[in-house]
Amino acid sequence: MRDLNRFTDSFVFKADRPWPNRRLKVAAIVGHATERSVRLWLRTGRPGAFSVLLFGRGGDAAGPDVEDGALRGALGAAPLFPSDLESLVGTVRREDFQVDDYDADTTCVVDVAGLAPDTRYGYVLYDRDERRVVLGHNRLRAFRTPPPEDERRSFQFALFSCNMPYAVNGLFRKRTEVSNVDMWDFLGATLERHRDAVDLVIAGGDQCYSDGVETLDIWRHLNRTMRKEDGALLPDEEAMRSWYRDVYRGYWGFEGIQKVFDSFPTYMVWDDHEIGDGWGSHYLGEGAAQDGLGQLLPDLAERGLDAEDGRELMRRMFDAARQVYVEYQHSHNPPTDGDALDYSFRRGGCAFYVLDGRGQRDLARDDYRILGRAQFDRFAAWARAQDPAATPFLFVVSAVPVLHTRAALVAADELLGSLGDDLRDSWEHELHTVERMALMESLFDAASRGCRVCVLSGDVHVSAVFEIEDGRGNRIHQLTSSAITYGLSRPQSWVLRAGAADSGETTEGHRFTRLALFTQSAYALVSVDPGSGAAWFKLYGEQQLPSSAEPDRAVPLSHSLAKIRLY
């Protein structure tokens, strides 16, 4: 009976999920890359024996310049033996791996070492059982390794966050429709136009939404299905993992998203919606002034369950979300120790640190409620160790901005009801004063030693640039790019615009000035020249013109909406 319940609750064989697009099946992500190595994430779609085949592209030292049509034709042959390709592309590198079961949803990371710096490589996913290419033959896949670290070459990187390309319409709000997904085509076109200069992409959180779209919301599904049967609390964690995997496969099923992920080294971090709205910023204890449990699981009593059952279900949801986040996102980031999800890496005179603002977030702690003390200490030690002669630029990724909200709103959660968790999410909320002051102290300490410091964020569905200055004249920047796809009405845009601070003084006494604000869908490029010390923030939105070849088809404009010099 228990096994039947698991089957009933699982989405593994559920055919009636209302996805309006094709879900992800076989796919690749180019993850952490160095001048000599790359982490390739693959989803094979089924167990079996597979290989990654790599070969040089572009006429450089790694291989001959091959016409795309000829290469597609060769890769589409079946049966195909890897040795058959060498006459066309030169040396073929083969990395074998095995997917034994569905335990990780047929995802796997292949670490490839011994590559050449600043070299473009083509790659395919090869099925050894069927002796054919299953990814990379119809649309060719390729990536470029970064230049040698000691060259300090100028480069660009992209920043985006908040991907929700759906809307619900219809008389009874039952029809799920695709919305605003063209922004991914625009981002892909921008990256391709600058591909020889773009070294990496940062996905700043909310790469998918477990909630937010009524017809796809797995928290609504939990409210409808939570129960006790024969004394057992259901659904179990295994079923919940299938829900989160379904969300990733739906949200990432668009070709435009895959073109970005499988072409450029992409570094990812989660935010609340990969788990649940406002995760870690709800009061869940008995008699809490604001009933977070009631907001997340409003049907608890109606389903015959108590608060302890609700907390157990939430624990299961978090554990499921975390495992699937590791499978789909964190696994191809730089390796981390133990259970840590924060990480760092370097790129040509720039040091990056990506903070995990969700995995350790806990309002029940006395302090350091966002990062936890252990993670904060790791970050602070990293910041102290940065030498401006070696890494003149420091980029710190915090999914939630350290500065954004008007001061009058920050502590108003008791008055604003359901908005309380959104405000408590903010670094500026009084609950986080000690932790925020410690974070800002670390950032300004690095700035005082000559490092050029920028915080990179998403979350707030507003793109903005703030300059923050301490009493000694040291400056840091808050750069926010949000959201890449999230349809907002004009009134909603006005509200978000009104909620963003313009100028003033932070809790610590630092002066700040807003340099830019944009409330529609956007993504950003950051240009860095470690040699000269210059950096620019370029914001791109939905600008388009009719194509001369196809008048009914719009094409993105090539220039940015705003270009702001940071240093």
Image: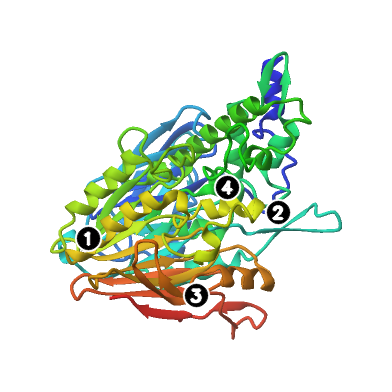
Q: Which mark is residue 517?
A: 3
Tag 2: Cα neighbours inside 10 Å, few (<14), some, or many (≥20)?
Answer: few
Q: How is the image coloured?
A: rainbow
Label 2 vs label 1, nearer the camera = 1
Q: Which residue is mark 4?
A: 24
The kind of residue on which mark 4 rests is Leu
Closer to the N terminus: mark 4 or mark 3?
A: 4
Looking at the rendered structure, the secondary structure element under dot 1 is helix
Q: Rounded to the nearest whole Å, what is the CA distance between mark 2 and mark 4?
A: 12 Å
Tag 1: Cα neighbours inside 10 Å, few (<14), some, or many (≥20)?
Answer: many
Say which residue appears at 38% left-offset and 79% top-offset.
564
Looking at the rendered structure, the secondary structure element under dot 4 is loop
Q: Which mark is residue 338?
A: none
Left or right side of 129 for 175 = right
Q: Where residue 151 sits: x, y (%)?
A: 16, 65
Q: Where residue 144 sits: x, y (%)?
A: 32, 60
Q: Rounded to the nearest whole Å, what is the CA distance between mark 3 and mark 1?
A: 26 Å
Left or right side of 44 for 234 = right
Q: Rounded to the nearest whole Å, what is the CA distance between mark 4 and mark 3?
A: 34 Å
Closer to the N terminus: mark 2 or mark 1?
A: 2
Left or right side of 228 for 246 = left
The kind of residue on which mark 1 rests is Ala
Q: Where residue 359 sits: x, y (%)?
A: 44, 40
The kind of residue on which mark 2 rests is Pro
Closer to the N terminus: mark 2 or mark 3?
A: 2
The answer to whether the residues at label 1 and label 4 have Cβ atoms under 8 Å apart is: no
Whether residue 43 appears in this view of the structure is no
Q: Which mark is residue 446?
A: 1
Q: Rounded to the nearest whole Å, what is the CA distance between mark 2 and mark 3?
A: 32 Å
